[in-house]
Amino acid sequence: MRGPRILSILFAILFALAACGSDEPSGGAGVPSSITVFAAASLTDAFGEIGEVLSEDNGNVEVEFNFLASSDLATQIIEGAPADVFASADQTNMDNVVAQGLATDPVVFVENRLSIAVREGNPQSIATLEDLENEDLVVALCNEECPAGRYALEIFAAAGVTVEPDSLEADVRGVLTRVGLGEADAGLVYLTDIAADPEVEAVDIPEDVNLVATYPIAPTDDAPRAATDFVELVLSETGREILIDYGFQVP
C-alpha cells in the first residue's frame, strides 16, 4: 500500500509545481525583455525620450541604444551585431541592410536639414558657405561614409565652393563636440543637433543648395514584438510630437 500512496504524493507535488509555473510562463507578459535599437547619432536625444516612454508604458521592456553614424551601424548589422531596430539618417544604408535580407518594409519617419554649426556668439563671423573656404578657419566635417559627411560634400558641390576640412569625425556628435569646445570654428551638422547644444548656434545654408535628409526605420528580421512596438511608437502621434520637439520635420 505504501507504493501507491507515495506515487500519489509525488504526483500531487508535481501538479502543484506545474500550477505555480503556469502563473508566469517563460517569455510571458511578466518576464522582462529588452530590445536594442541601432540609430543614427542625430537621433540620440529624441530616441532616448521615446525609449523612456515605451518603458513607462510597458514596464517589462528595457530599451538599449547604439548611436553611431548610419554607415557604421549598417556595417555592424550586416556583420551580425544583435540589433532589433535600425533607424538610419539616409536611405542608402537602410537599403544595404534590406538587401542582405536583415530588415523589410522600412518607413521614412522624419526629415532633417544640415546647417553650419559655429560656437555661440559666432566669434569668427561666419555667414556663408563661401566663408568656409578661408584657410585660417578650422573646419570639422563627418567622414564621407557617414551620411552627414556625404551630404556636406553634395552641398559644397551645389554651392560651387571648395572646403578642405581640418578634421573628419565619425558622426555628427563628434563634429558638434569639436565646435562646442572651440577646437573647430565651424562644422556641418543637422539642425536638430545644433538645437540640442547650447554651446553652438546655426548659420543657415540656402535652400537652393541645401538638401533634405530622410530617415527610414524598420525592425530587423526575427526581432521580438517589442521592436515593432518601438517602431509603432516612433510613428505614433506621441512619437511624432517628441521628434518635432527636437526639431525634426515629420513627413
Image: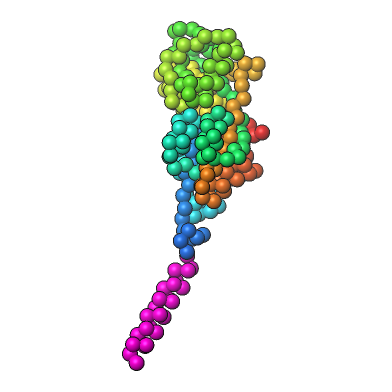
Residue 153: x and y in percent read 53, 16
Q: Is residue 142 visible?
A: no
Q: Position of residue 156 (x, y in %)?
A: 55, 13
Can residue 107 be seen here? yes
Tally of numbered tags: 0
Chief secondary structure of the magenta portion: helix
Quadrant location of the C terminus in the rendered image = top right
Image height of 41 relative to 18, above or below: above
Colour scheme of the picture = rainbow
Q: Is residue 125 above or below residue 211?
A: above
Q: Is residue 119 magenta?
A: no
The residue most toward the front is 100
Magenta stretch holds residue 5 = yes
Specify the quadrant that holds the N terminus. Answer: bottom left
Q: Residue at x 51, y 40 (%)?
A: 102
- Of 249 and 161, nearer the camera is 161
- What's drawn in magenta, residue-wise? 1-24
Q: Determine the image quadrant of residue 239.
A: top right
Which residue does the image show at 46% across and 73% down from the upper left?
A: 19
Q: Position of residue 164 (x, y in %)?
A: 46, 11
The one of 239 and 13 positioned closer to us in this rendering: 13
Residue 157, horizontal then vertical, whole percent:
57, 12
Q: Is residue 45 left or right of residue 183?
A: right
Q: Residue furthest left?
A: 2
Residue drawn 49% across and 25% down? Answer: 146
Image point (48%, 68%), residue name: 23
